[in-house]
Image (tube, rainbow, N blue to C red):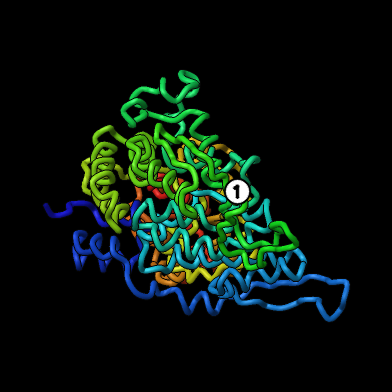
Amino acid sequence: MALDIDPRLALNKLAFGPSEAELREAGKMGMEAWLARQLKPSGDDGCGERIQAARFHLKYISKTPEAEVDEERPIDVIGQPIEEHWKVVDKKLPNQERSFLRTATAAATLIRAVHSRWQLREVLVDFWHNHFNVNAVGENLVAVALPSYDRDAIRPQALGNFRAMLEAVATSAAMQIYLNNRTSRGGAANENYARELFELHTLGRPAYLNALYNKWRDVPGALDSKPQGYIDQDVYEAARAFTGWSIEDGAGIGAGRRLPATGKFIYVEAWHDNYQKRVLAMEFDPYRPPLADGRKVLDLVADHPATARYVCEKLCRRLVSDQPTPAVITAATKAWTDARRQPDQIARTVEAIVRSDAFRRSAGTKIKRPLELYASFARASGIDATPTPGLLNELDNSGQRLFGWGPPTGHPDDSDYWLSSSMMRRRWSLLLGLADDAWKVGPPQAAVSIAAKATPEAALLAAHQMMLGVDPPAKVTKAVLDGMGLRVGTRFDNRKDALSLARRLLAYCAMTPTFQAR
């Protein structure tokens, strides 16, 4: 059945908002072809040259003058392998060197959100970064590992296979550091990673049954090797399974030996608890091959029905609404389960969501988070969007600090969180700042044609159609023009401040509830 959805709705949900060029392209090729191409991104995303050209100022003072830094550093250092980045740790360079890698990754994210031709992948990358959250602001070693985490763990599988992504995340330096698994050893297993693996990454909190059962055999279905959920015993045993999963961080491993200092994943056999284990009612024999225990845990949680339900509900909440219908969750869960061995499992699941009635009827059901608001305004108004420290700081202060959310939960994905009075003020401030080019990211090019309109009402009409695709309601026209001190029927195009006013008109259109939602 042909995909019958409005292009503007699709680009608001499956992209960071519509741009004029992409609306034309989607209309020309049809949404069926547009979705098929987005589900299978290949080749360059169109952002390479922009990332290569972007520079951020880095300055710090050192005890030795020859080691001081004051330069415009390219953000494309994020393309280097992790062993290159780890040198800033090995050489004990100032923290500014470490935090720069988070800044550079965030800046590249802002570029891709606006300019990537693979918009759906960018939306999913943002989703998975929240799902597998790490805090690169609170822990500078995570910042060092962040470029590799984004490039090697999240992006390759954003539309790929969940089990493959689970292992890429589990073996990443960023997650190993953030949830303390790199120091986990037999006899003193650290439970942090195992706990979040069950609670946040896979089965989810609804499947935590320890309040009802404290012995594995009492969990419904356990005696048939199909437990309905997990309990603390599963977490403890899984933590033992991941002992010895670590990174090359220069730590001592006994007998005067040390690990290399590269940040790369390593399995330290001497740290692994080799004894018998039981996870989700499955017996693990003792002394299995290297990595086998941890990989078996990942197999079990990836295949569990509770994982399919939990992750698919989160995907529906991201792509459809805060309260997705049971029908769309069921459709997504079926697609997820049927494709669990396929390399494009996630893409097939997303397609099932997009083809649902719930998705087709979901316009305006989600509030844009600051990243989405920035990108959608830039795309609609023609801002070139070269990120700057000022823009990053504004986004940080808006409540969505990229790669800097403290708890492992990731940023909230419910509309109420983003609609407090203080956050609304920050959202309006963000839009006005972008319109006025307050952070030197580039002015809205669309303002040029709007400034050429003969009257204020014609200028507002053009701005509203550009941002929202429809004519403004009469009450919006009156409120905006009155608020700006513009009289209906007067000349607009011959005003000296016409261009500045046109930029403001774009911002005011973006402040409307319709634009704030997706």
Q: Which residue corresponds to the image point at 45% horizontal and 51% vertical from the top-left?
A: 292
Q: Where, by quadrant of the figure, is residue 462 drawn?
A: bottom left
Q: Is residue 432 above or below residue 203?
A: below
- Residue behind mark 1: 181
Residue 448: image x %, image y %? 44, 72
Image side of residue 111 versus residue 73, left or right: left
Q: Which residue corresponds to the image point at 26% horizontal and 53% vertical from the top-left?
A: 348
Residue 275: image x %, image y %? 53, 41
Q: Nearer the viewer, residue 378 or 245?
A: 245
The answer to whether residue 268 is visible is yes
Q: Which residue corresponds to the image point at 33% horizontal and 40% vertical from the top-left?
A: 308
Q: Nearer the viewer, residue 398 or 469?
A: 398
Query: Furthest-left residue in view?
Result: 1
Residue 106: image x %, image y %? 56, 62
Image side of residue 461 versus residue 444, left or right: left
User: For mark 1, does the 10 Å Cα neighbourhood hold few (<14), some (14 to 19), or many (20 or more) residues?
Assistant: many
**Secondary structure of the residue carrying numbered label 1:** helix
Q: Given the image, on which type of amino acid does mark 1 rest? A: Asn
Q: Where, by quadrant of the figure, is residue 246 drawn?
A: bottom right
Residue 319: image x %, image y %? 35, 46
